[in-house]
């Protein structure tokens, strides 16, 4: 098989890149190790930066998002002393969209089918070859038979545990990592949201987040030790702890119910440089991971896709390789800014195991300053809604 761009990974970043390229007349083949049903079963992020919203619209997959997504003008933050609102629209003139990653992926699958794009599921033993040469190719196994795809370029969109990043030699690759000493216990429940916008709560008992997917589906999180398991937490215990960490006026009006999904996610910050080697380009979680506190994971993947798509389009339509040559540097500049913001949100909102009463008061003072400073709120809002693309 021959294609122009081989895409490793059929999650939202791989499908979005394929969608944009195919709409521009550039051929792709997407290889995904899992089944479509498995990919759609993943419970992931639900906050879209406005640049991501616009990118999805440009890809032709924004109709259902615009009908069913919930536009938020800001968010709430709280400490043990009370809750305040940061108005993104007022501070920086932008908003965010609440629309689950699962729904984004479903829309992309439907759009890929409508275009007749090639998405191969259950592709095992994927390997990348001659990436640093002029004729790269990909091999994989399906149904017991080995297959080969010759291509011009390879996009590694296969996540943190995929094969793309390790293909870059260790002598060339530099990795930066911060592993946080706690996780998020999250539940999905068919209940109405407890507030009109997200609530980020800093509390001496630990962090909590009240989020949502739609008017009848909520997503809640509490910070837990890494030693905890899902079995340690009954639904009743979760609701009680969540209410203890949220403002009383919110907790008193909260509607609870049985969880339909429950999981614990560890938190880490991770960046791998460079994001290009030869004919291979890394996108999304294959190159970087951020803690979910700043709502940047899916949005960073989308910005990578934007830069890579623009580079590939310029190359195939005008013979201009400058966007491909600058891809790693440009993408990483935005990645590190978002990594900084996610680190700031995480360290400001969570209770650390060795944290003293002094440290807790510093956190509370940081948030009190944010509550009273229009300049500080503008800085937070600018980062939360998403920094502009460098080529805007």
Image (cartoon, helix red, strand yellow):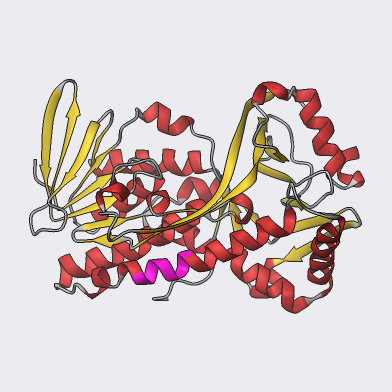
Residue at the image position 60 percent from the left and 59 percent from the top:
342
Residue at the image position 66 percent from the left and 35 percent from the top:
186
Q: Is residue 371 left or right of residue 174?
A: right
Q: Magenta stretch containing residue 332, yes or no?
A: yes
Residue at the image position 87 percent from the left and 48 percent from the top:
247
For this orientation, the residue located farthest to the bottom is 375
Q: Position of residue 210 (x, y in %)?
A: 73, 44
Q: Is residue 207 left or right of residue 57?
A: right
Magenta portion: prevailing SS class? helix
Q: Quadrant of residue 78?
A: bottom right
Q: Report the span colored magenta.
A: 329-335
- Of residues 277 and 42, the one nearer the viewer is 277
Q: Position of residue 188 (x, y in %)?
A: 65, 32
Q: Magenta stretch containing residue 217, yes or no?
A: no
Q: Quadrant of residue 379?
A: bottom right
Q: Quadrant of residue 30?
A: top left
- Of residues 112 and 39, the one nearer the viewer is 39
Q: Is residue 2 left or right of residue 268?
A: left
Q: Position of residue 103 (x, y in %)?
A: 49, 40
Which image quarter is the N terminus in?
top left
Residue at the image position 83 percent from the left and 57 percent from the top:
360
| Number of numbered callouts drawn | 0
Q: Position of residue 330 (x, y in %)?
A: 37, 71
Task: Tell me: residue 322, above or below residue 30.
Answer: below
Which image quarter is the C terminus in?
bottom left
- Of residues 328 and 83, the one nearer the viewer is 328
Mark yes or no: residue 292 visible: yes
Mark yes or no: residue 213 visible: no
Q: Is residue 387 left or right of residue 90?
A: left
């Amino acid at each position: 098989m021959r294609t122009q761009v081989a895409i490793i990974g059929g999650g939202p970043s791989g499908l979005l890149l394929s969608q944009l390229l195919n709409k521009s007349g550039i051929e792709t083949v997407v290889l995904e190790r899992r089944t479509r049903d498995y990919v759609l079963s993943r419970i992931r992020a639900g906050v879209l930066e406005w640049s991501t919203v616009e990118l999805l619209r440009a890809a032709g997959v924004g109709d259902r998002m615009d009908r069913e997504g919930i536009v938020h003008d800001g968010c709430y933050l709280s400490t043990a002393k009370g809750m305040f609102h940061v108005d993104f629209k007022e501070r920086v003139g932008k908003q965010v969209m609440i629309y689950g990653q699962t729904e984004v992926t479903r829309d992309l699958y439907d759009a890929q089918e409508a275009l007749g794009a090639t998405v191969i599921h259950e592709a095992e033993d994927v390997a990348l070859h001659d990436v640093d040469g002029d004729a790269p190719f990909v091999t994989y196994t399906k149904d017991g038979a080995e297959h080969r795809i010759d291509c011009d370029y390879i996009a590694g969109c296969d996540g943190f545990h995929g094969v793309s990043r390790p293909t870059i030699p260790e002598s060339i690759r530099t990795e930066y990592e911060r592993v946080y000493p706690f996780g998020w216990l999250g539940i999905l429940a068919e209940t109405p949201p407890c507030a009109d916008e997200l609530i980020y709560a800093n509390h001496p008992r630990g962090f909590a987040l009240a989020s949502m997917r739609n008017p009848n589906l909520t997503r809640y999180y509490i910070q837990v030790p890494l030693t905890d398991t899902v079995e340690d937490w009954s639904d009743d215990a979760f609701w009680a702890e969540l209410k203890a960490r949220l403002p009383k006026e919110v907790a008193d009006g909260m509607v609870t119910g049985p969880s339909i999904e429950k999981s614990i996610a560890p938190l880490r910050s991770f960046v791998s440089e460079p994001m290009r080697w030869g004919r291979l380009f890394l996108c999304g979680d294959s190159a970087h991971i951020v803690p979910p506190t700043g709502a940047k994971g899916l949005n960073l993947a989308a910005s990578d896709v934007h830069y890579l798509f623009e580079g590939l389009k310029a190359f195939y339509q005008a013979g201009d390789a400058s966007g491909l040559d600058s891809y790693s540097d440009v993408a990483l500049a935005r990645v590190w800014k978002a990594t900084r913001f996610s680190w700031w949100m995480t360290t400001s909102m969570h209770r650390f195991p060795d944290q003293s009463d002094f440290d807790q008061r510093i956190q509370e003072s940081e948030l009190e300053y944010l509550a009273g400073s229009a300049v500080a709120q503008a800085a937070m809002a600018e980062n939360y809604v998403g920094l502009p693309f460098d080529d805007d």
